[in-house]
Image: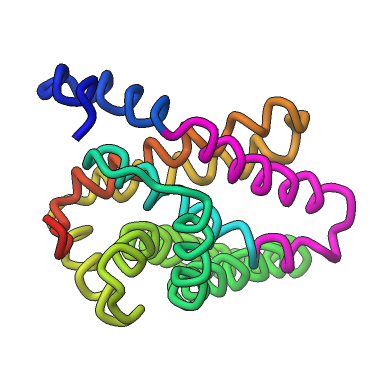
Amino acid sequence: MYAFLESWPRNPVARAAAAAWSELPLLLSASAAVAGLWVLCRTDPLLLGAAEFAVMPTLTALAVTFHSALEGERSGILRLLSNVCRAAPATWLLSLPATVAALLADAAFQLAEVSGQAWMLLSGGAGLAVSVIAAATGLLAMPLAALDKVTARAAWMRAWAAALRHPAPALGAVGAYVLAMLASAHLSFAVLLLLPIPLVSVWVAAFRASGIRTEAA
């Protein structure tokens, strides 16, 4: 374990800052890829789906890198790329429920606006609630699937149990992700370059606070 991590054993903020600093070149390199994809989404709406297809595996690999740094393990570009490839299939499956629920909720709200039928708002609200729950579970499950190399279903079940026991960290991860997505629609590339690191920091903090234990632990 790094000496500077050992010197702050009881200060989580200092440990997080030290972990980010130790892997800063690697984190910034991956952040540049994420920022570029976010900017690409703004220039051509048709590329939104394709860009998001690559964003979540990259962010998950960033989360795994940051988690490993907190544990005192060094990563590298090859390990980061390996984490992206390994996390991609599970990440796509785990993000699907929240994406579908959000799209259905958005469709219900639009139908309510066009038709004027108030009961459609209840349908949209239910879909929105389901999308938040699915996103909270999925965000806890994605790093778990990459760290423990388990199936998406196994990661989902363990993350679901953890979210029921500790809902606040899971909802905090959802809030951070939604804020990042909203910010990505307006910030310049230079600022977006720095956005994934704090997002991943909150995400990993939520993952660790949820009580999920990995095989390495």
Q: Give the range drawn in magenta.
A: 23-52
* Residue 111 is at least partly visible in this image: yes
Residue 51 drawn in magenta: yes
* Image: 76 above or below 191: below
> At 23% across and 75% down in the image, what residue appears?
157
Is residue 80 or residue 108 the one in the foreground?
80
Residue 119, horizontal then vertical, whole percent: 55, 69
**Residue in the picture at 67% in, 48% down:** 33
Q: Nearer the viewer, residue 147 or 77?
A: 77
Q: Name the main secondary structure of what is drawn in magenta.
A: helix
Q: Residue 53's x, y, as percent?
A: 64, 67
Q: Residue 135: horizontal and vertical position, in percent?
A: 42, 60
24 horizontally vs 112: left or right: left
Left-right relation of 161 to 48: left
Residue at 55% across, 68% down: 99
Q: Is residue 160 left or right of residue 32?
A: left
Q: In which quarter of the image is residue 117?
A: bottom right
The structure residue drawn at horizontal position 47% and vertical position 74%, both measured from the top left corner, is 97
How far from the left and from the top, in percent, is residue 69?
A: 31, 39
- Can residue 60 be seen here? no
Which image quadrant: the C terminus? bottom left
**Membership of 41 in magenta stretch:** yes
State the quadrant of the N terminus: top left
162 shown above or below 86: above
| Image quadrant in which you'd find residue 162 | bottom left
**Residue pushed farthest right?**
44
